[in-house]
Amino acid sequence: MSKLILSVSPHLRSRTSTTTIMLDVVIALIPALIASVLIFGLRALLLTAVCVAACVLAEFLFCLLCKKPCTVGDLSAVVTGILLAYNLPVGLPVWQAVLGSIVAIIVVKQLFGGLGMNFANPAIVGRIVLFMAFSGTMSNYMMPDDKGELVASATPLVATGSDVPSLLDLFLGNNNGVIGETCAIALIIGGVYLMIRKVITFHIPVVFIATVFVLSFVAALGGGDVMAALSDATYQILAGGLMLGAIFMATDYVTSPYTKWGKVIFGIGCGLITFAIREWGSYPEGVSFSILFMNILTPYINNWTATKPLGGAKNEK
Amino acid sequence: MLPKLNGVIVPHRKNTAALAAVKMTAPKSVTIPMNMHIGAPSVPCVKVGDEVKVGQLIAEAGGFVGAPIHASVSGKVTAIGPMLASNGTSMTAITIESDGEMAVSETCVPPEVNDYDSFIAAVRASGAVGLGGAGFPTSVKLDVKDTSRIQEVVLNGAECEPYITSDTRTMIDDADLIKEGVELLKKYLDVKKVIIGIEKNKPEAIAKMQELSDEVFSVKALPSVYPQGGEKVLIYNCVGKIVPEGKLPIDVGVIVMNCTTLAFLAKYMKTGLPLTEKLVTVDGSAVAEPKNVLVPIGTSIEDLIEFCGGYKAEPRKILYGGPMMGIAVPDASAPVIKNTNAIIALDEKDATLPEQTPCIRCGKCIDACPLNLMPVEYARALAVNDFALLEKRKVNLCMECGCCSFVCPARRPLVENNKLAKAALRKYQAEKNGGNK
């Protein structure tokens, strides 16, 4: 008889692992991928594939060079790649997408110690770096015309006059933007899947979106027309990167609070900053900046919202 | 209404729930350790070569928090010496070679009980300890001096650990004994309210107990969410009270007893047979014929599993108790002791735990903890020796139920970490207090 294994209890573990969680996120992102290919054509698929390949390869090579155990198998780099790609306009040169992937994986994730150690969301920072470095190509939103040729057009957040899409178009994704953000229904399906699978809780996405909705509604009420204000607030939550950001980027475990109340505060903060940038800032969109800012506050939020142990006595000061 | 406590859904695996107890034939020998309870080790009062009978006193309580020990087989004492305990320390054990007769000692006569003091004395003489697993001497727990302090007695029939069904069988097969036990509590401790908490996955036990309920005794069906049987969780869910940090259940007017402990007390008062055998669930992927077995205390795990048809696969891990809180034993010669409620033998597949990966700060451990603790923070605090944070976040309250490790997607050894953190915090506090004085 070989020796018995000795270990500390429990001797039983749930089936959920980091890999199954990441796989669930990938599955949840598939409806949006299908939508992006239908809306923007096959180049959306190409960009996604390039970002995923670049992220995975960057992580693999970094681990190899640093003689660290290879963490590609946990699929977290795949998720980063997909999310970064979803934040890019369809016409972005491939080499720029690769550069963004390298920044996300090497600079933001690995240099801080790899999975679980980064303080900011890699895909968000990758996007912001690209936005700063290549503001031309990064804000050159294009859509295929009737012949399938990519032509520049406005995004809903800056559109005026006849360019303004209807709410239904926004909901279905029939409008311009970065490749993964336009189809609200596809993103919501993914979000519901993640909640059913208990990968994320409703707190961050619902509070984030609700905050933007309420603030936009109040701001639009100045016009005096409640129906118009409701319509405007709905437009604000469907347009731009809010759905993608609130459901998939703000809910990143590593960079968002782990307490329930912390998640609520995080959602409110993201909503406030997004609204402020959209309303008064010089950028049309504020979702990524809001998430990055709240990422930085996350350790403090965790501390403020620490749970109260059952029966715990008051701490001596 | 009180908010619901956290917990986790664990697989039940109650394969033996329908199997009534089988009495084990006398093993060739038994090895009875002197530390089968919390408190002072018992002191042997027999010598090598002495002939003993079942139920005969072989070791006296070593202190107020202690319990006497009785021979579980008839035969000859062949050794009194050191043995390795499951926690790695050395302790004294008495080995008795069985003569196969299982002859009962003449000393086993029903105790004379007519008031509180004689009841507590009888409980003490019975050798009873908490049979749910904690092994706290029952006489010490019941000796509350002023019985008006007791508002409720909560009987633990939750049996929330996977596999284990020994309490379930006691509730079904020895329901009358539990009822008699309740009568004893009423009579001698003046208890006005007894509640038995049972997880809903044991409908037969719930039905049986409900048949016996009256104005004093009632049944509380609990959701099958682990760990319903944890003392603080059980009190919270059965009587809606919170036991404050550093206090005992009796400080909020509650006594918690395992249902099997109470059934044993009732039997002892009738027969005078002390605690010499224990109902043990034998199960797990390496066991050929899972069973509920009435085992003489001190029987080796080897002999017990042999009685259950031996192994059907090579055992790679053997546990005292269930998989959530059970203790892995270094080898199968370890004995069944008073508070053993299950022996689980696992094959290679079940014994091997998945490899750990980096913490992704998902917070699932926080959402799982029934006491609202934050295992993710203890892990980081311990890594950098941040004792102030461990103290502030109350790692000392951790009951090591295993929910956090169970849910952790990165398979971090959180319970192990909590144990280390608790020990480190105790040391830090002792040094701090020592320095101030």
Image (tube, rainbow, N blue to C red):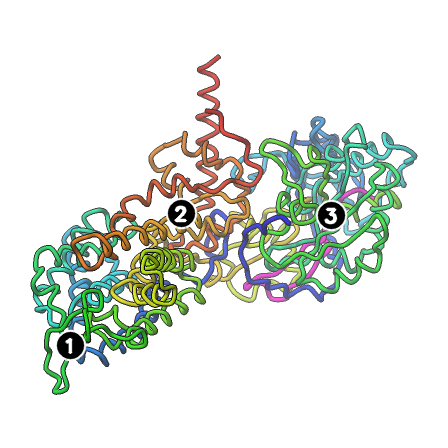
Q: Which residue is the site of mark 3?
A: B155
Picture coordinates of residue B21, whole percent (x, y): 74, 60
Q: Residue at x 37, y 54 (%)?
A: B410
Instruction: Pinpoint the chain carrying mark 3.
Output: B
Q: Residue at x 32, y 54 (%)?
A: A271
The crowding category of the residue bearing disc 2, from other C-alpha atoms within 10 Å (few below 14, some 14 to 19, many at least 20), is many
Q: Closer to the camera: disc 3 or disc 1?
A: 1
Q: Nearer the viewer, residue A109 or A173?
A: A173
In the image, A259: left or right of B311? Answer: left
Do labels 3 and 1 touch, CB within 8 Å?
no
As drawn, the label of residue B264 is none
Instruction: Pinpoint the chain carrying mark 2.
Output: A
Which segment is the magenta one? B273-296
Hey, what amino acid is under mark 2?
Gly
Q: Which residue is the site of mark 1?
A: A143
Above-or-below relation of B346 to A167: above
Q: Which residue is the site of mark 2?
A: A262
In the image, A153: left or right of B184? Answer: left
Calculate the distance from the C-alpha at mark 1 to the C-alpha at mark 2.
39 Å
Q: Secondary structure at mark 1?
A: strand
Looking at marks 1 and 2 on the same chain, the residue that comes earlier in the sequence is marked by: 1
Residue B370 counted in the magenta span:
no
Name which quarter of the figure residue A133 lies in: bottom left
Q: Secondary structure at mark 2?
A: helix
Picture coordinates of residue B13, whole percent (x, y): 59, 64
Q: Nearer the viewer, residue B66 or A166?
A: A166
Calculate the distance from the C-alpha at mark 2 to the C-alpha at mark 3.
38 Å
Question: Residue placed farthest to the front in the image?
Answer: A224
Do labels 2 and 3 touch, CB within 8 Å?
no
